[in-house]
Image (cartoon, rainbow, N blue to C red):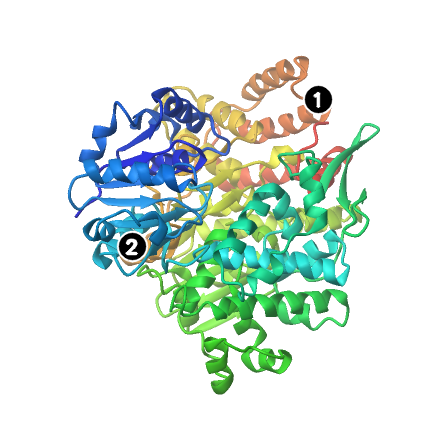
Amino acid sequence: MEIKKVVVIGSGTMGSGIAAHLCNANIPVTLLDLETEISEKARERIHKSKPPLLIDRSKINNINVGNINDNFDVVKKADWIVEAVVERIDIKHNIYEKIFRERKPGAIVSSNTSSIPIKVLSQNLSKEEKKDFCITHFFNPVRYMGLLEIVKNENNDLEKINYLKKFCEKEMGKGAIICNDTPGFLGNRVGVYAMQVAMTEAFKMKLSIEEADAVFGRPMGIPKTGVFGLYDLIGIDLMADVLKSFIKELPKNDPFQVVAKEIPLITKLINEGYTGRKGKGGFYRMNKQGNQKILEAINLESGEYFTTNKIDLAIETVNLNMLIDRKDKYGEYAWSVISKIIKYASSLVPGITDKFNDIDEAMRLGFNWAMGPFEMLKAIGVKNFFNRINTFENNIFLENLSKTKDENFYGERQKYTDIETLGKIKPKAIKVDKNKSADIYRFKDFNIVEFTTKACALNYDSMDALKNATDKPLIIINESMQFSAGVNLTYTMNFADKGDFKSIEKFIKYFQETCKHLKYSDHPVISSPSGLVLGGGEEVAIQSNFVVSHTNIVMGLVETGVGLVPAGGGCKEVLWRWSQTSEAKKDPDYAPLQVFNIIGYAKTATSTVEAVPLKFLRPEDKKVMNRNSLFEVSKKLIEENKDFVPPKECRFNLSGKPLKEKMIKVLEKLYNEKVILEHGMKVGKELANVLSGGDTTLDKTLSEDDLYKLELDSFMRLIETKETQERIKHTLKTGKPLIN
């Protein structure tokens, strides 16, 4: 069979998200609801959504809409029908009756339910109908969350299930994991349990919510929201409903029942409208004190709010042993939570899945964990783990492992996919060179550099790794959520606070040298970005010889937001690309003015489609839907470019002073309209100086080094100002730009 047409029934949050992502995959899709007006409004929401659900907003009309009364005949031509209506079994049964009456023979029918078992959903279906019915549980938001759980049972046609998996993997870019028909399926079963353990242990040990979130967060390889922040994000009332569902569906002796018990404080918060970010606040809230907004946290014992305190555990990277070995309450809490998660997750093997590392991948893809429970066990060490735990009765997995004490129990990662992923290839490296900020994985025919800092921020060590890895073809790629959010601003400000601007200049020069080295290396350099590709991260990518990009990127040169100009060759490279357009051949000022607008406004692309017209990506750069495919496609590029020849150096002819004056007129207009303030003018003038070529004329040819020098000089003049330093500090503290 082939899936060429899809119908999605139900245009709520999930139905809309699924339809939008099918559109992203160029699969013809029809979205149905009770009334056409409802599905039309859903289409409008998709078009306006932030962050955008569509990779290319112009394709919005590729989503057809209709209603289930007048337009249900579209089901007859569909190869896959997805039900995404409300979680009421009577409504779902009525829909299935209509679908199976109208569908063509062999068409797949699936439900997007997050909790109702197949056996309940399919109880009215015939034996033949059950073969083609399964659950496809997408995680929200569908475009951005990698996990798709395909839930099957003994009635399914396994060949069809496997086809659906490969389709969703290849065409929709999903990490599609097949699991058995058990309550909560796979991701939520473990993920929600982990949240509840982290919460109940915090109550038990009398930790503050900031302390709990500091531990159950980045040091553990879990997103910075922690548990209480995540509760607020999801919605405290929604989480309460999820727990009720688990209590109802799970056996009474399941350990989940212990941690799912009602917590009086949560009941109180819900009753008073404190349901999280969507309500008046939750465990955290923003409160006004004068003209300032203050983040407050609730005291778990008294229920009163107080100003939050930053908890510094002095752990920069994920290090579980460092965390659990602490001789304080944080170490005790970390061990209690981690050990319980490991024990619970392992107790689900083989009930949910016989491939234990599928659970790990579900936590990576669905909850953005750096490591799943079994990777945590591997990191702690098998012997160390068993020396510390007391009991693990009725746990087949741990019972077997306790006998062998096999430290190499894990085997290959990401068994759920046939794709040659980064996670699979890294353990096969001949040699691994590590520093504080990056790892070099050395293979026979190529090298891989992976950044390891927070947000993959760039520093000297990052540059060293890149330079030292170009003795062979190089792939720059990360398993973390970001490619790179740019140069480490904290690192830069440490020098600025001391007035040591010579060290900053030395670092920027080294960054420029590194980027130039990448571009003109004897071997091809391939950047394979996903997530954030900002500032210095974009400068590394844009000066690589080839780019293989995940469609879900946020890409741009955003330095003006912190009072700087791109100084790693970003201005130069984007300017060169724009200068190759037909318009620029006619008008020498065309390209600089376009780039002035793009960089000046710190424009970003939120997809590969948006990145191409901005010249952050080239049309010929490879784009992939599935993040797992980045390495495979990059490796293929190396094989296709064995006769690689470095590019020729760029040359620029710029107008100088007259062009700079044009740009200043634009700035003056913005200043008069109060779009920018005094320092915004100064930043804009420095950018204008770079893009106009400084003290030059059209008949004078500038080299790349000349442009690098202009970038550096402008950068240094700005970093020495109090106003730029204020912008940087404000951004580091709040995550938001300061307009001054």
- Name the outermost residue toward the bottom: 403
* The quadrant where residue 557 appears: top right
Res. 115 in view: yes
Q: Secondary structure at mark 2?
A: loop
Q: Which residue is mark 1?
A: 677
Q: Of the numbered discs in the image, which one, if any, rests on residue 133?
A: none
In three-dimensional space, the C-alpha distance between marks 1 and 2, rounded to whole angstroms, equals 49 Å
Circle 2 residues within 10 Å: few <14, some 14–19, many ≥20 = few
Left or right: 334, with 439 as reference point: right
Across and down, in percent, residue 631 comes to 37, 56
* The quadrant where residue 27 appears: top left
Across and down, in percent, residue 594 comes to 48, 24
Circle 1 residues within 10 Å: few <14, some 14–19, many ≥20 = some
Across and down, in percent, residue 46 comes to 42, 29
Circle count: 2
Res. 25 in view: no
Across and down, in percent, residue 423 comes to 42, 63
Q: Amino acid at mark 2?
A: Asn
Q: 321 or 740, which is in the foreground?
A: 321
**Height in image: 151 above or below 567?**
below
Q: Amino acid at mark 1?
A: Leu
Residue at the location (34% across, 24% down)? Answer: 582
Q: Secondary structure at mark 1?
A: loop
Q: Which residue is mark 2?
A: 641
